[in-house]
Image (cartoon, grey):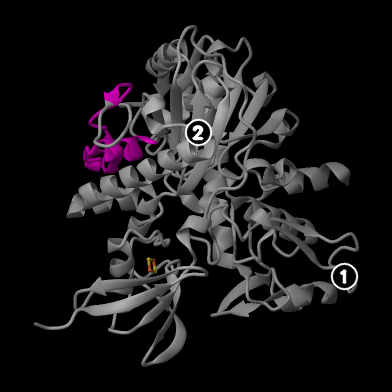
Amino acid sequence: MMPESKLTMITDDLQRSLVFDEGQTVLEVLQQAGIAITATCGGRGTCGKCRVLVDDEQGLEYRLACTTVASDGMQVFTRDPAEMVIQDLGQPALLQADADVNGYGVAIDVGTTTVVCRLYDLNSGASLATASRVNPQVVYGADVMSRIDASISGKLGDMQGLLLSTLRELIASLCKTAAISCDGITRIALAANTVMEHIAAGLPPDSIGVAPFTPLSLFGDDHSFADFPAPLWFAPAIYGYVGGDISAGLLAVGMDRSPHLQLLVDLGTNGEIALGDSSGILCAATAAGPVFEGAGIHFGMPALPGAIASVRAKEDGLGESGGLQLGTIADAKPIGICGSGLIDVAALLLQEGIIDQGGRMLDISELPPHLRRFCGVENEIKVFYLTEDRSLYVTQKDLRNLQLAKGAICAGIETLMQKGGLKPSDIHSLHIAGGFGKALDLDNAAIIGLFPIELRDRAASAGNTAIEGISAAVVSAAARVRLRQLAESCSYVELSADVLFNELFIDALGFKSIATTEDTDV
Ligand code: FES
């Protein structure tokens, strides 16, 4: 019998021996072992996100896990996936609980990139513990389309299995933290986008990938799985690309009961938008892509430890004695940049005149001398350096991808407003939800034109509204009924073929807001 081939996976404090078959790539070996390394392009070798440090006969070097064939004795150095937890989850509020109900409940938000779980005392409505993890399905790609592709190629069962085992582990960890028995959990509720809810339920999401994007289910019902202490109630979705995470978010901001018009923008994977009040809600998804979670950005990453989440010029500006001041998630050493950091960079470049209103980075010869040390060319693409050692930078292509995403969001907002016969002055509040938490600088978001600049004074970061809404649904039966009614009453606007949206999108690609401000100043 042939001896088994093995490689060794090494993290900061863990070493694992992994058996593999001849011809398997390093990504496939890690994937098979349930190790969540990011593979934004789903292993096509195009995104560069699966980079790992490899030590083998060819020496020690960085390579793409998806294009490197595993060899016996190879050592692969990766980050410890357990360390990749979401830091900025906010402080859970005390919720209105049902009368005479005892036991515990778990609220779950399954994002395309991250999973968050909260444990509640059903009697008091108090949150007892929170736990989070990278969604292990990231090995199949960063966006919902990659997960649909993976389902079509027979990976649905694998993706469901990975997610359910992560949820079981997170629930066990919540119970351990709160020192309770998992048997005491009597309610579990889950909110996610429609594709994630399909995968969690074991239903193929394939039909959501093609027009007319019709899902097999809109949920709002219980699903039972082995080794969970209670059935999982799935939040009702509104449409194929406006899921239970958005209906939960609408419940959290109270749009269905609001006497004033509200706007909710969720900067997750699809850039969903909802506009309405107690008389009705219009929603849409913009297909902005997961740029705000780091996909399509050279050094992009989700808002996880080490992500640059804020970028400012130092007090002395960018001159000789000044420079850049970077803020990272968990104050860790910078290893990439997340959505809020990218928005800051674009606003800074615009204000400093390093990019023009069309988003073009100026040539070094066109820049004033004091700005030249921040700019350069890497692999024939113009870049802006973030770190003094020049190891991290933002490229011209990153800025183009940001323009497409922010243009889609802003045009989506304008489209819904125009379809409702509304002006920015009619909107009472704008909630910006997403994984950024408090890191998002709303002034900079307005400067780059993520939303109409007239809404700046009514805009606020709402954090993770999906976990807030689904938490209310765990502790209150009335909130679950309200969530179902809310989802049924929303009207969906399909933007992909909408002439008005497409016209507004072209208009929204540039950086007009800063020009408006400057023009006003002159
Ligand atoms: Fe390897 Fe994208 S380059 S997963």
Residue at 57% of width from left, 52% of height from top? 303
Residue 483: image location, x then y, percent: 43, 17
Quadrant of the snapshot with the N terminus: bottom left
Using the numbered discs, state the Cα–Cα distance from disc 1 to disc 2 in whole angstroms: 46 Å
Left-right relation of 7 to 440: left
The front one of 502 and 372 is 372
**Mark 2 surroundings: few (<14), some (14-19) or many (≥20) residues within 10 A:** many
Q: Is residue 253 above or below residue 171?
A: above
Q: Is residue 407 above or below residue 193?
A: below
Q: Which residue is mark 1?
A: 319
Q: Is residue 31 magenta?
A: no
Labels 1 and 2 touching (C-beta < 8 A): no
Residue 349: in sight, yes or no? yes
Please tell me how many numbered marks the rendered image carries: 2
- Ligand 1 resides in the quarter of the picture at bottom left
Q: Is residue 496 above or below residue 474?
A: below
Residue 89: image location, x then y, percent: 60, 40
Left-right relation of 506 to 287: right
Tell me the amino acid under the disc marked 2: Arg
**Mark 1 surroundings: few (<14), some (14-19) or many (≥20) residues within 10 A:** few
Residue 418: in sight, yes or no? no
Residue at 36% of width from left, 56% of height from top? 141
Say which label, 1 or 2, has the lower sequence index.
2
Residue at 40% of width from left, 59% of height from top? 36
Q: Which residue is mark 2?
A: 118
- Region of the chain picked out in magenta, as a range: 193-222
Tell me the amino acid under the disc marked 1: Gly
Residue 138: image location, x then y, percent: 39, 55
Quarter of the rendering containing residue 102: top left
